[in-house]
């Protein structure tokens, strides 16, 4: 029972849900017709806890795979490469800009980490980058760092 991965996963999400409930109450719940800033967090935390309790109950009744099976076959060099690429992305994001950083990240992921045909990689990277950029900047009016392309995107 102590090595049941479902049980530990449920306990983890129960703790996260409890924190979200606490944070929501701390931000202020308000009233139903005038919700405070923590209203949604509070109810989302309750939903998270309810779902986590369901997972814990299922794990106690029928068991689950052992913890060691979660990591079997993990390709650690690829995991570390993705973490490194995301760190580089985060560091260069503001100075270099959203479009060049995102294009470079997606191409690196699709060429080196989990290789796909280079033509497909270019199409997916360009469409995904400019699709997300358009959705965030044009439709949602979210300002993204222009970086190197500041003069062009002006």
Image: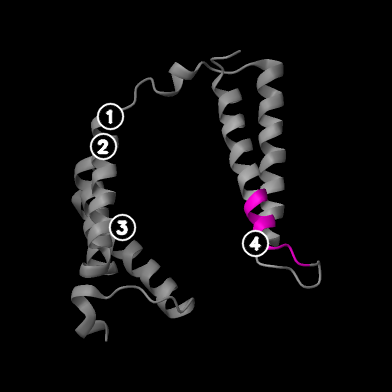
Q: Earlier in the sequence, mark 1 or mark 3?
A: 1
The kind of secondary structure the magenta stretch mainly shows is helix
Horizontally, is 71 left or right of 95 in the view?
Answer: right
Task: Farthest residue to the front: give it.
Answer: 26
> Mark 2 sits on what residue?
80
Where disc 1 sits, the SS reads helix
> Mark 3 sits on what residue?
124
Where disc 2 sits, the SS reads helix
**Observer-nearest residue: 126 or 146?**
146
Q: Residues within 10 Å of mark 1 (few under 14, many from 20)?
A: few
Q: Give how far apart the Cα atoms at labels 1 and 2 are.
A: 6 Å
Q: Earlier in the sequence, mark 2 or mark 3?
A: 2
> Mark 1 sits on what residue?
76
Q: Residues within 10 Å of mark 2 (few under 14, many from 20)?
A: few
Q: Give how far apart the Cα atoms at labels 4 and 3 are.
A: 40 Å
Q: Is residue 8 magenta?
A: no
> Which residue is found at the position 72% from the left and 39% from the top?
50
Foreground disc of the pair 2, 3? 2
Foreground disc of the pair 1, 4? 4
- Where does the magenta region start and end? 21-30
Is residue 121 visible in this depiction of the protein?
no
In the rendered image of this protein, does residue 17 appear above or below residue 6?
A: below
Q: Give how far apart the Cα atoms at labels 1 and 3 are.
A: 25 Å
Label of residue 27 in the image: 4
Q: Give how far apart the Cα atoms at labels 2 and 3 are.
A: 23 Å
Rendering coords of residue 9 (x, y %): 56, 30
């Amino acid at each position: 029972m102590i090595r049941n991965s479902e049980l530990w996963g449920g306990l983890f999400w129960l703790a996260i849900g409890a924190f979200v409930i606490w944070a929501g109450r701390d931000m202020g719940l308000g009233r139903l017709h005038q919700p405070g800033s923590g209203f949604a967090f509070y109810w989302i935390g309750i939903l998270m806890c309810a779902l986590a309790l369901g997972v814990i109950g299922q794990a106690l009744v029928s068991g689950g795979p052992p913890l060691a099976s979660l990591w079997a076959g993990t390709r650690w060099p690829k995991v570390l490469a993705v973490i490194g690429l995301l760190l580089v992305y985060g560091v260069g994001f503001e100075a270099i800009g959203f479009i060049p950083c995102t294009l470079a990240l997606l191409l690196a992921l699709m060429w080196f980490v989990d290789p796909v045909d280079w033509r497909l990689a270019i199409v997916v990277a360009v469409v995904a980058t400019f699709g997300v950029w358009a959705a965030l900047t044009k439709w949602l009016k979210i300002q993204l760092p222009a970086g190197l392309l500041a003069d062009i995107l002006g």
